[in-house]
Image (spheres, coloured by chain):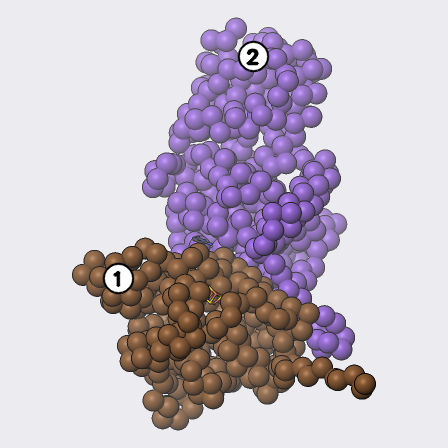
Chain colours: A purple, B brown
Amino acid sequence: MEKVFSEAKKAFMTGNETAAWAALAAGAEVMFGYPITPQNEIMHYWTRMAPKYDRGFLQTEDEISAGFTVCGSVQSGKKAFTATAGPGNVLMQEPFGMAEGMRLPLLAIIQQRGGPSSGTVVYSQQEVTLTTFGGNGEGHRIVYSTATHQEIYDYIIKGFNTAWTYRFPTFILGDGYQAKMREPLELYSPEDKGIKMVEPYPLIGLPGHIGEDREPKHLCNIYSLEEELYEVVMKISAEYEAISPELTEYQERECDDAEIIIVSHGVVSRAADDAVTALRAQGLKVGCFRPITLRPFPAQELKNCIQKSGAKKLLIAESAYGQLFRLVRQEIYGETVPMETLFMPGVGIIDYDIMSKIKSML
Amino acid sequence: MAMLEPVHPLTPKSWYLPSKPHKFCPGCGHGIVLKALGENIDELGIQDKTIFGCDIGCSLLAWNFFACDSTQTHHGRTTPVMVGIKRSRPELITVGYMGDGGGYSIGSQHLLNAAVRNEKVTLILVNNTNYGMTGGQMAPTTLPGQKTETSPYGRDPEQTGYPTKGPEFIAQLTPDSAYVARATVSKYNQLKRFIRNALRNQIEGNGFSFVEVLSTCPTNWRTNAQQTWRFLEDEMEPYFPVGELKSPFGKGDK
Ligand SMILES: Cc1ncc(C[n+]2csc(CCOP(=O)(O)OP(=O)(O)O)c2C)c(N)n1
Ligand code: SF4
Ligand SMILES: [Mg+2]
C-alpha cells in the first residue's frame, strides 16, 4: 500500500479530519458509515481522499448496516472501520456484539454527543457505559479515550493494530469538541515511527480447494447448548484478561504526595491537568490520574496511585452523570478513599470548574 | 451371508457431510432449497469461492450445511454482512440465506436498500408464512385468515395488513440488470433453475439477485404430509405467483 506521508508533517486541523488521515495512514481499506453529527466530517474527508488512495466507502442505510457491513468486510480480510455517535452508537451495539462474539477486528471511532435520546449534537462524555459495556455481552472490547488531536491520530493507528492483533472490537472514544476543534499535530506514516502495521487476513474466503487443500471454514454465532456458549465466553474472558495488562494505558501527574487526586478521562483530563498546575502553584497538593484505556481499565495503576500518595480524597470529574464514576468505583473496589464528584452531563468542563470544586473539598 | 453395501443418497459435492443428516424438521422445505443451491454450486464450479451466510431463524441450522466458507449473522442482518463481504472481495460469490421474518420484517430496510443500490449479492429468502424458529408467530407473509401463535384467530388484514409480496416490490426497486424471482419447493426443476440464474447473475457481475422460495413448515402449521402439500400448492401458490419477475437472461419464466 502506498505511503500516505513521505515524511512527517505539521498540520492544524479538526479532529474529524485528523481521524480520516489517521485511518488512511494506518492502511484502512474501506469505511462504512451513516451520517451523524459530530462525526460527519470523518466521512467527508474519507470520501474525498479514498478514491485517490484506492480505498473504499459505502454510505449504508443506517448504523446497524454500517456495523454489519464492517463485520462482513473484516471477515473477508479487509481493514474496515466505521464512525458514529449518540443514537448511532446505540444502533451499532448490535453489530459490535457480533464482533465481540465472533472476535472480529472491527474498529469504530465514536465522537460522543449529548444524550439521552437525540440529546445535542455538540458534546458529552455520556457514551462511556455504552461503548465499554454496551450490548448483550461482557464488555470484551478495547476502548481508548483520546484527549488531543495527536492522540486521535496516534490511537487510530494503534487501534487498527490492536484490533488485528487481538481480534477484539476496538474503539476510539472521542467527543464533539475533539471532533470539531482545530489543533496542531504531526501527521506521519507509521513505518517512519518504527510502527509496523499488522496485516489483515481473511477468516473466510480462504485460498485453496475445499476438501483437497483445506476444510471449509464455518464461523459460528449461535450455540445450541448452554455449555457450548459457556466454553466460548469463558475462553474469550480468559484471553481478554490475559492481554489486559499489556493493553492498559494511563497517565498520572503529581500523585506521589497528592492529598486529592482528580480522576478524569478524554478531553476533561486536559482541564484536570491545567487545574493541577494552577493548584500546585498555590501550594495545594493535588494530582491527577487519567485512564487512557477505559476497557481494560488501569485499575491496579489507579490503586497504586491512591496507596502511594495516601490521598485523602478522589475527585471524579466528567461531562456525564456518573458513567466514569461507576467504572472507577467498580474497578477500585476495596479502596476506602472518599470520592467526590463533578458531574456536568453534556457540558464542557474547564480548569476553573475543577479548581472551584477542589477548593470546596479542602 | 454377503454383507449388503449401504446405499447412500446422492448428495451435492458442496454439501458438508459431517453435518448430515441435517437438523431441519421432517417435511421441512429448507432441505429442498439447500439441495437446489448445492447442486448449482457444484454445476457452476463455485464451491471454493462461495461464501454462504445464514440469518437467525431456521436458516441458522444451515451454518455448517455446505463445504463452503460460511458465516452466521444476526436476525435480519445477513444482507449487510453479505454486502460488506462482496464489496471487499468482489471475486467471492456471496449467498445470503434468510427467512421471511428476517428479510421482510426486521431486515427489510437492508433488503430494500441493497436492492436499490443493486448490490451484487445473491439472496435466497424462504417464505414459510411464519416465524418458524421462534415457534410459529405471524410473519409479514402470513396469509389472510391464517392462524399463528400471534394471530390465533387468523390474520386480519384490517389490523395487520396484507402479506408482503417481496419479489414484486424488489422488482420495482431494481434496474434491469437485477434478477428477481419467486420459486416453490413443489417445483424442483424450476427452483433449481431460478437459483442458478440468481448465482449466474452475480457471477457475471450484473447486479442484485433475489429468489423468494415458497416453502413448508409442517411443525408450526401443525399439518400432516397431505395437508402440508395442500397448503403450499392450494393456498400459498395462488397468493404468491411463482415465476421470474426480472431476468437479464431473456424473457422470464412465468
Ligand atoms: C433482534 C432479534 N429479534 C428477535 C429474535 C428472535 N428470532 C429468532 S428467529 C426469529 C424469526 C425467524 O423467522 P423467519 O425469519 O421467518 O425464519 P424461519 O425460522 O421461519 O425460517 C426471531 C424473531 C432475534 N434472534 N433477534
Ligand atoms: S420449524 Fe418449520 S421451518 Fe423450521 S425446521 Fe421445522 S419445519 Fe422447517
Ligand atoms: Mg419464516
Q: Is residue B145 left or right of residue B230?
A: left
The amino acid marked with disc number 2 is Pro
Which quarter of the rendering shows the C terminus of chain B? bottom left
Which residue in the structure is indicated by mark 1? B154
Alpha-carbon span between mark 2 and mark 1: 62 Å
Q: Is residue A321 above or below residue B67?
A: above
Question: Vertically, is A69 above or below A152?
Answer: below
Q: Give how far across and how far down residue A297 sits, in percent.
A: 63, 32
Q: Secondary structure at mark 1?
A: loop
Residue at x 45% of width, y 46% of height: A89
Left or right of B235? Residue A197 is right
Which percent across, then down, holds residue B228? 39, 74
Residue B166 location, quadrant: bottom left
Q: Secondary structure at mark 2?
A: loop
Taking the view exactly as shown, the residue that stands out farthest to the bottom is B250
Dot 1 falls on which chain? B
Reply above or below: A39 against A211.
above
Q: Residue furthest right?
A: B1
Query: Residue visible at 60% across and 43% down?
Result: A141
**Marks 2, 1 in one chain:** no
Q: Using the rendered view, name the quadrant where residue A152 is placed.
A: top right
Determine which residue is flagged by label 2.
Answer: A338
